[in-house]
Amino acid sequence: MMRTPLVAANWKMNGSRASVEQLVRALLAGLPVTDSREVLLCPSFVFLDQVAKLIAGSSIQLGAQNLSTEKAGAFTGEISGAMLQDACCRYVLVGHSERRSLLGESSDVVARKFMAAQQQGLIPVLCVGETLADRKAGSTLDVISEQFSAVSDAAGIEAFANAVVAYEPVWAIGTGETATPEQAQEVHAALRAMAADRSARIATDLRLLYGGSVKAANAAELFSMPDIDGGLIGGASLDAQEFLAICAAAAS
């Protein structure tokens, strides 16, 4: 099976109703209709309904940036997967490095969120990545293995038939630093090998995204690597022309 490239926009805690409308309309006007790549927008919770209405009838998919481990109940401020699905989401990010480092989400919590997402009808995008200290210590693959295995042990490798994995080196997020295509490919190949140890079929079909200061200038080279199936784009996804250029690189 050919893996369809996926370009996902993580808008993080950015935007206003006016800027969101402007950005989405620019993307709708600039994205050619193509089956050769998939585009996903992950706005802040408060803009999900607005974006859902704007992209209705288009090929753009909607995703959320986080979800609760719980299905319902007395969890003030939390949002369940069922609520997200009801808000027209198809995908949800889990385990983003900012949530791991700033909000203390452990690999166990990430695994529970991954499973909650699938149980409530969403496709999880599992984020994994090492810090600069990890990379300098030569423990990149140990960290990636621990983060991936925490989920595959809990959910089972078959769960990855309906999931995406995004490799985001923490030292490259929002820093302007980017892993070289070769560095990124090395980790992507290792991730695919980790999956293949459990199921060759799952590994072959699993979409692996790269995230970490992806820009129009470096997207084509990154996406040309054999195990990189698209990108999880942060800052550059807030600029319509920049993001459109990255989407074009994924489709070529």
Image (cartoon, rainbow, N blue to C red):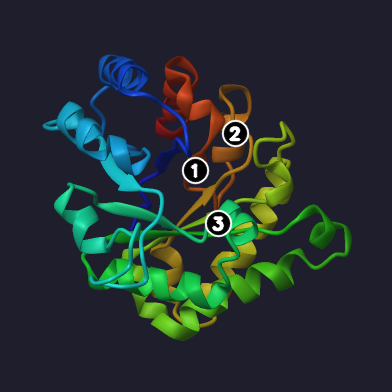
Residue at position x 51%, y 61% in the image? 95
Return the residue nearer the eye: 142 or 76: 76
Q: Is residue 158 above or below residue 63?
A: below
Q: Which mark is residue 99?
A: 3
Locate the N terminus by quadrant.
bottom left
Question: What count of labels does the image hold?
Answer: 3
Do tag 1 and tag 3 residues touch (Cβ < 8 Å)?
Answer: no
Visible residue check, residue 196: no
Q: Quadrant of residue 134?
A: bottom right
The picture places residue 74, in percent across and down from the top left corner, at 28, 71
Q: Residues within 10 Å of mark 2 (few under 14, many from 20)?
A: many
Mark 2 element type: loop
- Foreground: disc 3 or disc 2: 3
Look at mark 1 in the image and give the residue it sits on: 232
**Where residue 219 sits in the image (x, y, percent)?**
57, 31
Is label 2 in contact with label 1 (beta carbons under 8 Å)?
A: yes
Determine the secondary structure under disc 3: helix
The amino acid pointed to by label 1 is Leu
Give x and y (percent) for residue 110. 48, 69
- Mark 2 sits on what residue? 214
Marks 1 and 3, how far apart at CA:
15 Å
How far across and how far down the image is residue 234, in percent?
53, 36
| Lower position in the chain sequence, tag 3 or tag 2 | 3
Q: What residue do we see at 30% from left, 58% from top?
A: 79
- Tell me, yes or no, whether the two marked residues, 3 and 2, touch with CB atoms within 8 Å: no
Residue, far left: 57
**Which residue does the image show at 24% across and 32% down from the upper left?**
51
User: Which of disc 3 and disc 1 is earlier in sequence?
Assistant: 3
Q: What is the distance, in whole Å, between disc 3 and disc 2 at their CAs?
A: 20 Å
Between 125 and 14, the one lying in front of the other is: 14
